[in-house]
Structure formats: structure tokens, C-alpha cells
Image (spheres, rainbow, N blue to C red):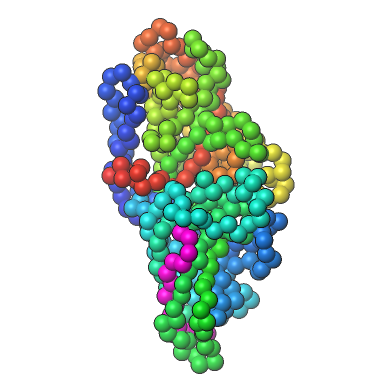
Amino acid sequence: MNKKIVSLLFATSLALSPWASQAEVTTPPVTQTTAHTWCASDAHNDSYSFNTSQGHAVWLPGVVTSLVFDNKGGKFVENADGTADFTGTLVVPGDANKSFTLNVKFTGLQTTAPEPPKKELDAKAYNEGKADMTKWYFYTGFTGTLTGVGDFAGSKLSLSRMGPAFQIGAGANGKNIQFGASGWFNFNIDAQPTNTNFKFYKIGEHGDFNIDLNPCVVEKTTMCVYAAPGSIYNTSGGHALWLPSMQTNTSASVDMIFLDSAPGILVEDGNTGTATLKGTLVRADNPNYSFYLDVFLSGFKTALLPGEKNKQELSSKAYSTGLVKPSTWYYYTDFTGTLTGLGYYEGLKASLSRRGPSPQFGIGANGKNLNFGGSWWLNYTIISQSTSKLHYLYGDNGDINLDIRICPPSILSKLK
């Protein structure tokens, strides 16, 4: 298994919502790395793009028209302190001897735009919700370098933010409606190439990052988990855990969600091929009904086992148009877990097991929208009922549908 190194080790203490139980409840702490790595690739135009310019990772007028990643691609590592590191080797298309090493540091993670974002797609992308800017997040500052290699050896360019904050999300790359990122930058030519046959010019122009981002296998990564909302590709949704067989005195089918202030925490360990998902789920209609969810996933795979099918619950257009590519998803072959009752469900405990296809992760894998997420079906068996005789849960099956994204600073500050 490929392993990409990420750092920053923290003791994670997941705080329960104040109404999780009528008695004080303490969530057991976990020690994890809090970072996430994306594999970066060149962003190419689709039918939602305004222009037909060549697909690229970096646009650099005055130096070269555009740059693309070499065959190793780029790495975009998001750290627990609200910073990110963007690295890779960029080459002139068709001439790998003309290249740069890229090293950029981003700072100031925000989940809301500090100013109007870059809107470089056709208006229909935003109007149809395919580029939902409310789901984007931003880095308010960055500095970096491009250091010449090969024919460009000896040269160095320094980069700094220009215009709107660097943006990440579906359609944020400004070239297509896939998950990606973009941002304009100023650049200064600090040193010219040693080879005098090549000379760079600064003519008042700025540069541009335009990249697609896909999940990478990493040694250890921690992400925040939320309910997966519905979209034009699947109008049902809005839950993290769906329990159709739950019986209460008010409802026969209940949606369980993670609160935005206390999301679930997904920790994936590429070294062992395992993952954990922990957090407090509350009933969407009444947070006094809640569970502590504790799941262990194992058997990491980058492809399905022979004869197995994945869950494809989005409209067929999501797959046929290439917006969602199941070939990029990854899987865990098994999982076990527990639901422990809190609040009105105190005393209740249920065991969870896999039902149907392997738990799946990737862009569109949540079965509800085009965000990065995960989903799987499950069986559950009641071990003990709630102390209150008015609130029962009957074992049967359910569905997990998750949006998964980098934790905001307000959550990261608690993961210490």
C-alpha cells in the first residue's frame, strides 16, 4: 500500500452535546494524527467551463503558458493547525526537461469566504447546485516557491496570494465541476535560469492554480463527518444514520445526524488498512434521543473484491457524465461497531455489522451528492434496551450516508 507521510499528533477528546444525556457523559479520548492528504492533478475544462484553454495545474504567463504535474502528481496536505502544504513537480506540457519543483504553504483555514470567491464557471454550474459555494472552504494566505529543474535549473520564483482566498470544493477549481481548488497569485522572478537560452519575464501578469483533488491513501488522517444532504442527483438524504426500523412513540423512521458543532471523527490509518468512526448522533427531530457511535473498519482495498458491486444510488447522469467516478473510490471489506444510548436512550446498546457491499469512500460515494463522503448498509442487533420503558429500539438494518471534509478550526482547536 502506498503511504504518504503526514504529521501532527494530538490527543483527541470528542465533546458530547450538552443534551446528550440527562447525566454527565464523558466521551473516551482517542490519540490520532489530524491531517488529510489529497492527490492533486491538472484541472481540465468540461461543459461548464467559460473558456477552452488547455488543461493545466498552473498558468504562468511571461514564464511559460502553463504547467502540468509530472506522472507522480501533486500532494495537497491539510494540517490540524489550519495550514496546508502543496508540493509536486510541474513540467511544460510535452517537455519534461523544462520543469519546476513546487512548494507552497497555505494558512488561515476558513469555512466561510472572507470575500466573494472566484466564479469562473458558467452560471448554470452555480444555479444548478453543481458548484455549491456554501460547501467550499478557504485559505486566506499563502506563500511559496517554484524552483527550476532541468533546462530551468538555477531559476527561482516566489509566489504570494492575489485576489480572493484560495478556494476548495466541488467546482472551486474554475475549470470543471469536480472537486478541486484554485487561486490567483502574484509571482516575482528571484533568479533566472543558469542556461542563458531561457529567460523569464514579469510583465505585470499574475498566475493561477487550477487543480483537481482526489483522496490519497495516507498513514493516518483525521476528518470531520457530517450528515450527507440530498441533491439534484438524489433528493433523499439529510442523515448520517438512517434507521427505518426504529420504533418510538412519535416516529417509525428516524434520521440521526451529527451536529455541526460536534461532528463525527473519521480516522483512517493507511499503515494498517483500518479506520475508526466515532461521535455522537442525535435524532434530527429531537436531540434528547442520541447515541454514541463507535465503528471499526478494516480490510482497506482500492478496488472491489471479485464479483462484488458497489452502491450507486445517485442519478445515472452522475456516473455517465463522469462527475462521479467509482473507479477512484476505495473500500473497507468489513466493519463492526456499537450504538450506545444517551439521553432518552440511556441503557440501550446495539451491535453493528456489515450488510451488502463493502463500505465505500470517495467523491459521490455517499450516495446523496457530489461531495467527498462514504456510505454502507448495516445490520444491527439489540444487546440491551433503554432504561426508560417508553423508548425502545428494534434490531434490523440501516444505512450510513456521510459527508466527509477537513475539520474547521473551531473543531481542530478541540482535538488537542
Closest to the observer, 122 or 309? 122
Closest to the observer, 149 or 257? 257
Residue 317 is at least partly visible in this image: yes
Closest to the observer, 117 or 341? 117
Spot the residue most to the bottom.
196
Residue 92 is at least partly visible in this image: no
Q: Is residue 161 magenta?
A: yes
Residue depicted at x 50% and y 90% = 195
Percent of width and height locating residue 310: 63, 38
Q: Main secondary structure of the magenta part?
A: loop
Spot the residue most to the top.
389
Residue depicted at x 71% and y 56% = 47
Residue depicted at x 46% and y 59% = 165
50 versus 256 height, above or below? below
The quarter in which the C terminus is drawn is top left
Percent of width and height locating residue 134: 52, 45
> What range is drawn magenta here?
151-165
Percent of width and height locating residue 362: 56, 45
Counting labels gives: 0
Left or right placement of residue 407 versus residue 59 in this view: left
Q: Is residue 134 magenta?
A: no
Residue depicted at x 36% and y 53% = 82
Percent of width and height locating residue 74: 50, 63
